[in-house]
Amino acid sequence: MINISLIGSRNQRVPASIRPLIPIRDVLSWYCEWLPHMYDLSGRRLHEDSHWDVPKIWDYYEKKEAAEILVLEARDSIQGYIIVYLDYQGSSAGIRTYVPFLAAAPWNRSFPPAKRQFANIGRILVAVAVIEGILQYKDPRLELHSLPDAEEFYRKIKMEETGRSSGEGLKEFRLGKEAGYDLLRFVLPFMEKDK
């Protein structure tokens, strides 16, 4: 578990932690807290990832030895999650760390209709994937495929498009070595020192 501080909507520091998935507890939390924010009252999707069956995705990756599902929790709610796959074989650059899924809670997104409760959820979670890559392979680089609405976020954290895309047409992005270390420098002030 990693203890961190998040910056709340009123610029206050809020204690948080990044921890492994607790399946039953976190699935219930997703159904009760996230799912109602993914659709409007008419059933129309509010976000690109509204159609993701997150409990099914978590169940699938929970069975993969090389995958880690990590959640960022604050105020007894999941504020975001990331799946880090540490045995990726699809990279043209020899990168072994891959992020198949990353999501901030609907109330932490910078695009409408949400008003963000916490900032930097995505950056913090990508930095955790960088840490995992360094611990496993001594390599801060990683790759992922982005939903269209998230592409600008990945560019903002200095990820580069590789020119490749997935079978679903999602663009592949790569976080290089220097950008990975820059991301860690950005996130370090949020991490709490052991007491």
Image: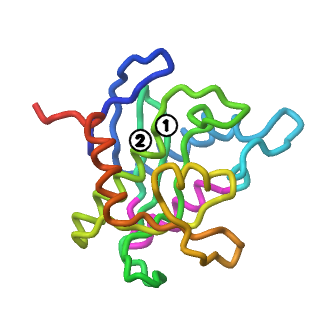
Do callouts 1 and 2 mark residues in contact (Cβ within 8 Å)?
A: yes
Q: Is residue 61 magenta?
A: yes
Q: Identify whether 174 is placed above or below 163.
A: above
Mark 2 neighbour class, 10 Å CA radius: few under 14, some 14 to 19, many 20 or more: many
Residue 31 at x, y = what percent?
A: 62, 41
Which part of the image, by quadrant, shows the C terminus?
top left
Q: Residue at x 58, y 42 (%)?
A: 30
Q: Residue furthest left?
A: 195
Q: Identify whether 108 is placed above or below 150.
A: above
Q: Which residues are magenta?
A: 52-68
Q: Residue furthest right?
A: 42
152 and 142: which is toward the camera: 152
Q: Residue at x 54, y 74 (%)?
A: 162
The answer to whether 195 appears left or right of 45 in the picture is left
Mark 1 neighbour class, 10 Å CA radius: few under 14, some 14 to 19, many 20 or more: many
Q: Earlier in the sequence, mark 1 or mark 2?
A: 2
Q: Is residue 159 magenta?
A: no
For label 2, the residue is: 72
For label 1, the residue is: 79
| Kind of residue at badge 1 | Gln
Query: Residue 113's image quarter?
Result: top right
Q: Residue at x 71, y 72 (%)?
A: 169
Residue 66 at x, y = what percent?
A: 36, 72
| Kind of residue at badge 2 | Leu
Q: CA distance from mark 1 to mark 2?
A: 5 Å
The answer to whether 41 appears left or right of 120 in the picture is right
Element on which disc 1 rests: strand
Element on which disc 2 rests: strand
